[in-house]
Image (cartoon, grey):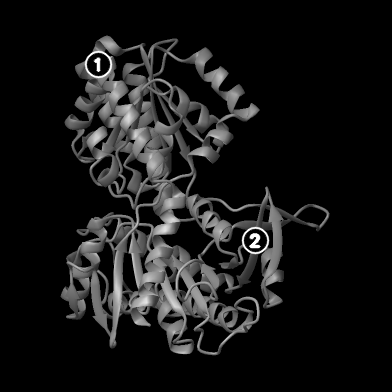
Amino acid sequence: MEGVGLAQRRLVVAANRGPVSFHDDPSGEPVVTRGPGGLVTVLTEVLRHYRGTWVAAALSDAERRLAAEERAVEVALDGEEYRVRYVAPSPEAYHKYYNIVSNPMLWFIQHYLWDLGRHPDIRAEEMDAWHAGYVVVNGQFAAAVIDEVRGGAAGPGSGPSGDGRDAVVLLHDYQLYLVAADVRAACPGAFLHQFIHIPWPQSDYWRVLPTQIREAVFRGLLGNDVVAFHTRHYVSNFLRGCADLLDLEVDEARGVVRYDGREVWVRAYPVSIDPASLRDAAGSSRAHVAELELVRRRREYLLLRVDRLDLSKNIIRGFVALDRFLELHPEFKERLTFLALLQPSREDVEEYVTYRERVERIVADVNTRHGTTDWMPIDLRIQDDFPVTLAAYAQYDVLLVNAISDGMNLVAKEGPILNRHDGVLVLSEYAGAFEELGAFSLGVNPFDIEGQAEALHRALTMPADERADRAGMLRRVVEENSVEKWVQAQFTDIAAKLDAEG
């Protein structure tokens, strides 16, 4: 870790999910696989540069056995080396923490998903889930982080300090809002940095939550030295929330909140991808076979969406917009396919089960209304098949990202890097990626069906030179703002803050 004050500091990372998953095979032997999700990808990039320990929740029996040892384990997988420590909440506490508070309560608040005329109802069950689930599990994470901060060597010739002055702690996402305050109380010398990977809503939407919960969220985050988001817009919302909800002094121009005698920096670091690694994956034999099949079956135009089956992704309105597009422009019937690659998500949360049923129903309706005996406009695939996704990225003519609200959305960055058709990106103004990519995409309001239908038509009829110019600029922006740059920007600011504080 370059910079004054960083070279001798050890790194502890904490996130709900770990970089690898341990499971028992039928013989009882542990099997190690890569952990799911984009967070694993970006934090692996951090650990490539700075060796450290990753603290995560134990989600399998094998991981719970490792958690019982109360120490980190070393594991190597796919050329990467990890040091992982697990915490093991009880199944009941984890359910309350994850399935009642984190998802849906906080997720829905931060993505503006609640239908406030009907939901949420915050009753005794939700308050119990907060106290007996979220608070408890955050406390377990904090205890493990504190133990790691105190328990390992900082570097050659130096040992751990009780106050944590030889440690940098990187906390990630909305499941761990209370951890920083506990770690700071126990290890006041540790440098604490928390990255929020989802949107941060305006002050009034936080007022949906009871005062004690929303204040605990804000004060917990203010236990950090740096609070980080993907966009300047989310930074502004957080600063205004600190002023509106806690009556704190904020300096919006400098991105600073004054809290508990400290200056907390609030910063934007737009996360990105590793283009080289993505291209390597696209060159695999499985991706090649999948692309040959797509080419064999494709019509004149390929429209694409790649999403988790999440309410925030606005999947249904995308299909309704296609329905409207085909009504307005019937000359495109049988000339296109809308390929929807949707990954199952949170299948143990009732709202997500219902949403999947609604998605399948609207697809059936649109296909029945416009399809023929040998053509269906929507090809819906609910699966997690990365080679197929890579193949589709290469082949699309239009990529639709119409999220209601999104912290960043890496699909909007992955697609243009691999695409070979000068594909047009139709991008929601509410996606975090819009700050970087909006000028070279077709921006849409995710609630405006007519506008989305018109954007699809404009994308499909755009002159070839304009398509090429836009596609080239999208690639350039993503190439110039890689995930490596995202990592370095954060550590540059960590070093700068340490220098400023002496």
Give the residue drawn at x 51%, y 19%: 294
Secondary structure under tag 1 reads helix
Crowd band around label 2 with a 10 angstrom C-alpha radius: few (<14), some (14–19), many (20+)? many
Q: Are marks 2 and 1 in contact (CB under 8 Å)?
A: no
**Vertical placement of 417 versus 92: above or below?**
above
Of the numbered discs 2 and 1, the one sitting upstream in the chain is: 2
User: Residue 461 got which mark?
Assistant: 1
Report, in whole angstroms, how far the alpha carbon at label 2 lies from the one at label 1. Answer: 48 Å
Mark 2, residue position: 82
Crowd band around label 1 with a 10 angstrom C-alpha radius: few (<14), some (14–19), many (20+)? few
Lateral position of residue 50 relative to residue 26, left or right: left
Secondary structure under tag 2 reads strand
Q: Nearer the viewer, residue 29 or 15?
A: 15
Q: Label 2 amino acid?
A: Tyr
**Vertical placement of 79 versus 16: above or below?**
above
Give the residue drawn at x 54%, y 82%: 146
